[in-house]
Image (cartoon, rainbow, N blue to C red):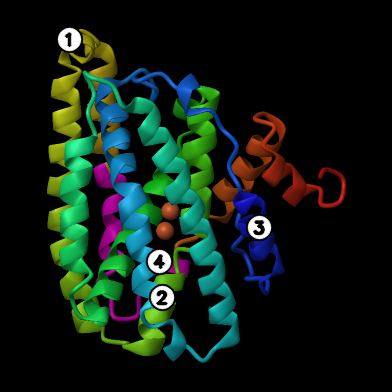
Amino acid sequence: MTEVATEKSYQNRPKALGITVRKLQFNPKLIRRHYFANSPVMSHLLTALSSTFPIGEQFFVHSVRNVRDKVKDEKLQAQIAAFIGQEAMHSKAHAQFNEAWRSDDYNLDRFQAWLARRNDYVKNLHPKIQLAITCAFEHFTALLGGYILRHPQVLATLDDDAVKLWVWHAIEEIEHRAVAFDVYQAVYGDDKVRRMIMRSVTTGFASLTLYSATRLFLQDKRKSLPKVGGNIFGLYLLGKMFVQLMPEYLSYFKTDFHPSEIDYSKMVNYWKKQLAEDYQMKSFQHELKPGLIN
Ligand SMILES: [Fe+2]
Ligand SMILES: [Fe+2]
């Protein structure tokens, strides 16, 4: 009952151009542990990221809500509502995904408990700093989302339910990539702090992800180590990602940077069609042919 009510309340909100709140239907139990290109390295890395999402994305929402009443622009208010709706759905889906992994030999709980303690600390910082942290992370999630979507051949090797989760999330991260940034500019517009926080977030995010992915890899080493080919391929993808994303990452430090200057429309449209047709995802079918499918 609560779920239906929540979903309907999103539908009643004013439309935010280009940002659609979609409900994900997937079965995380059908996803193998080494789901990403049969590569333990890449799979543990993405699972490590996933373990940060339930807490992380709730924090993003919190940091925008902190200053929401200072935003006068109605269009931006509608986008904030859609952003909150999307992140709430992501948080829920990744909590389901993480829950499906909980087992004696693969433990995400300790890391998540540590994150929860950090979250309490960060929520006591000045609202401007909190929002600048969100802007930095939203730049990363859009970049990573774009990178995932640029690799249809790799995605074709994933379990269907893994594609549904990661591609759906990637598309929506791209759709709402400018919301926190626009709120920050409207309320504070302090580029110096925005860039300074990006430097700290980059170091923190990279070390956190590396630490947590390594922990998962070591917990699973008996199954992960023998997959030499998959691991080499994973390291190749990571190296390529680093080189390809560097210019986009650095663009954040320009004074006139805006997240929408990176154009993802071609790959987003390609994947919306794929999810509707090949993966039969109702929310995308409805979007492409409104009125035909309930
Ligand atoms: Fe998200
Ligand atoms: Fe996001």
Eye-nearest disc, 4 or 1: 4
Asked if the residues shown at circle 1 and circle 3 are in contact, with their CB atoms under 8 angstroms apart, the answer is: no
Type of amino acid under label 2: Arg
Q: Which residues are magenta?
A: 242-261
Left or right of 35? Residue 280 is: right
Give the residue pinned by disc 2: 65
Decide which of tag 4 and tag 1 comes sooner along the chain: 4
3D distance between C-alphas at marks 1 and 3: 45 Å
Decide: is 182 above or below 148.
below
Can residue 157 be seen by looking at this rendering?
no
The dot on residue 172 is: none
Decide which of tag 1 and tag 3 comes sooner along the chain: 3
Percent coordinates x, y for residue 276 in the rendering: 69, 38
Quadrant of the rendered image holding ligand 2: bottom left
Residue drawn at point x = 20 percent, y = 51 percent: 115
In this rendered view, identify the residue nearer to me: 42 or 23.
23
Judge the density around disc 4: few (<14), some (14-19), many (≥20) Cα neighbours within 10 Å: many
The dot on residue 5 is: 3
Type of amino acid under label 1: Arg
Asked if the residues shown at circle 1 and circle 2 are in contact, with their CB atoms under 8 angstroms apart, the answer is: no
Decide: is 72 above or below 54.
below
Judge the density around disc 2: few (<14), some (14-19), many (≥20) Cα neighbours within 10 Å: some
Give the residue pinned by disc 4: 61
Asked if the residues shown at circle 2 and circle 4 are in contact, with their CB atoms under 8 angstroms apart, the answer is: yes
3D distance between C-alphas at marks 1 and 2: 44 Å
In reply to whether residue 58 is colored magenta, the answer given is no
Percent coordinates x, y for residue 152 in the rendering: 51, 32
3D distance between C-alphas at marks 2 and 4: 6 Å
Eye-nearest disc, 4 or 3: 3
